[in-house]
Image (tube, rainbow, N blue to C red):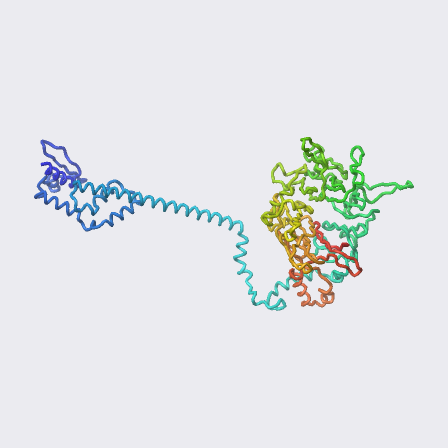
Amino acid sequence: MIRHNLRISKQLYRFTELRNVGVGINGLNFVRFYSDDKFKSIEEFKKQKKDYRFGHNFSSLDELDNQNQKHFTSDKHSDSSNLHEKISQSRYNQLNENDINSIIENDPRLINLKPGSAEYKYQQDLIHREFQQRGKKEQARYEFIERFKGIGLGILALIGIVSIHQIAMNYEYLKNKITHNFNYKFDDSKIKSMDDPSINNKTIDYLTNKLIRELSNDIIADLEKLNEVSGLYVFGSHNKQKLPFRFKFFDGMLIKDVQIFQDYLAVINEKGELYQYYKGLKEPVLTKLGSKVTKCQISNDLVYLLTKNGEVIYTPRMDKSVPKFDHLKSRSLLGISSTKPFNKIDFRNDSKQNLLHRNESIKDISTGQNHILMLSSKGRLFIANTALDPNNFMNYGQFGIPALSPFGENSDQIPNNQAFELTLLNNEVVSNKDGAKSIRPRTFDNIATGKYHNIVADTAGNIWSWGKNTFGECGSEISYKTDFQPVPKKIFTIADFLSFTKNTLPNKLDTHNWSVENVYAADETSYIKLKYSDENNDAENQSVLISFGNGLKGQLGSSRFMHVCPQPQVVKSLNNLSEYNEFLGKVVDIGIKDVSIGNNHGFITLDNTGNYKDVLTFGDNEFGQFGNGKVAKSNKPVRLPKLIEPEDFTNAELEKNDKKSQKKLVRKINDITTNRLQLLDGVKLANGASVEQVIFAGDDSSVIFYKRK
């Protein structure tokens, strides 16, 4: 009876078309059907109703079992491939509970089992567990794939960001690199000779015409042989020439020092005499000082001179009107008074006591826009104001004394040409072993001044600076607190030099073998020349030049244009230079013989073996101050063409317009490999004097002169 009722219930469950089931009345179940359409009559209702015979739609229980068996043995469930496919797809389409039950009930392994039996339920439980395990595996696999996709997308995003940044930072370079072959496509294999008229005519003709415009009959007539006649070469804004040409007045003259400031030129010859020249004069004029001078500097409207006796005197520039200049008045032993064309820096303090010690004199001077820094023979530092006109005076802390600070009450009332000792810098506080403190002198051996800042090196190898620091020229980080540095500050020590050069020189270098050879300064840039010496291995010797400050015009020489740079930059082009020494029979290091720094450009003279020294230049070249016939600036040291000599170009060739000779000269100027500028060093002239050539960088102009060796 129970089995009969169970089968009746299963059969009733299959009536899926029922919309609602009514309640039972008197043990009978009544069914009512609903439709969206309303019946207009009882006849229409009777036509659509369905009759069901409960328990009479099958003849026997065996017939019912056969019907269920056919339901489970349909062709689409002949294997388990669909089941596995649905399980694998379940990670993409979330299955609800009914879908899961349907998949399990339709599993082929339940075909031959009777629903509801113990074997059916056991197999159904195994299938369910298998389904869960497969689901977990698929979920884990799906999560792994998604994580891998996330990592991949992150890496691609990072590569994209870095690529976009590099493209943005190097856009001009990449654009020129890509378009170079289209704009400047030229088959080098077809070039046989520069004399071939079918190639590069435009470039050669352009340079030739440009050279002819700069050459004149007078210039060509003034040409002299380098190793026979001494003299002075000038180029840049002073004479509007982009190639070095001789200043005829100084031919045959040996020179000690030169200062060139745009249109103004000051020259000290071997006799210690001062010549001044500007464009309004026909030729340089000798300024009779009555004292022999060894060095000259220009500041504002005055020329400051260091005498042979160690005194600092100053005289007005000939191209400037200085009404407030106070000439030095003296009286002879006979009581005759006289007025000198110069005056002296006053080294007396307020008590009229001499700041210089006995047997102490000044051995070096350097000037800025309105200050002069002086180094004594005992290594002490003094400073003075050089601005005669208060309207031309600017105080950015370049005086290095707290009382003269730009933040003081009397910062604009500093007496001019009155020396002040840098007491805090000239002395240091040291502690003894027992803890007692004492003061001892600190000595210096190198000084340099920029427009409004100073840089000095003490004998212990420490670097000090003070003054204006807008571009990092004092070696300090830029902030509103360090824009002015009114008090001298130690910025670098010997130990710091090793860290500056660790990426450009071998790591095995010893800190204690470093030394400071000199310091230099442009208007807003500072330089330090270092020397590394190894007594056991000469091959390790290195000369290093570091720079910091304003590099907008390439004056840092570090292969980059930087507006602000407080961190020292190594001029890497000068590192690890070497050549073969024929006398020693081995490869030796090429050091740095000399460095000359102008307002925004500089020259580096290398210490090659022999009597000829290579020259490199970097920085601004707006006025042709490089002397290479061009006006393009350079942020790294480049070579220069050799000086023009009489055999290169004659006046007759110019008059008859000899194109062949002109082009030959152009090719020689542009060939800086075999025809590069090399300064004489220890060469004897026709008169027997042993001389050296010196190149000097001034304000937008440059000179080359002969000096006795």
For the N terminus, the quadrant is top left
Q: Tell me where residue 679 sits by quadrant.
A: bottom right
Q: Where is residue 11 in the image (x, y as percent from the top left)?
A: 13, 41
For the C terminus, the quadrant is bottom right
Please state if 187 lies on the left or on the right of 244 as rendered: left
Please state if 245 lies on the left or on the right of 45 as rendered: right
Please state if 531 lies on the left or on the right of 58 as rendered: right
Please state if 81 lies on the left or on the right of 314 as rendered: left
Q: Where is residue 342 in the image (x, y as percent from the top left)?
A: 81, 44
Q: Nearer the viewer, residue 420 or 575?
A: 575
Q: Is residue 17 visible?
A: no
Q: Position of residue 596 (x, y in %)?
A: 70, 50
Q: Nearer the viewer, residue 29 or 450?
A: 450
Residue at the image point whose x is 80% and y is 32% from the top: 351
Q: Which of 661 and 202 is in front in this view?
A: 661
Please say if 640 is above or below 346: below
Q: Position of residue 415 (x, y in %)?
A: 76, 36
Which residue occupies the extreme front position in the image?
Answer: 536
Q: Can residue 433 be seen in this view?
A: yes
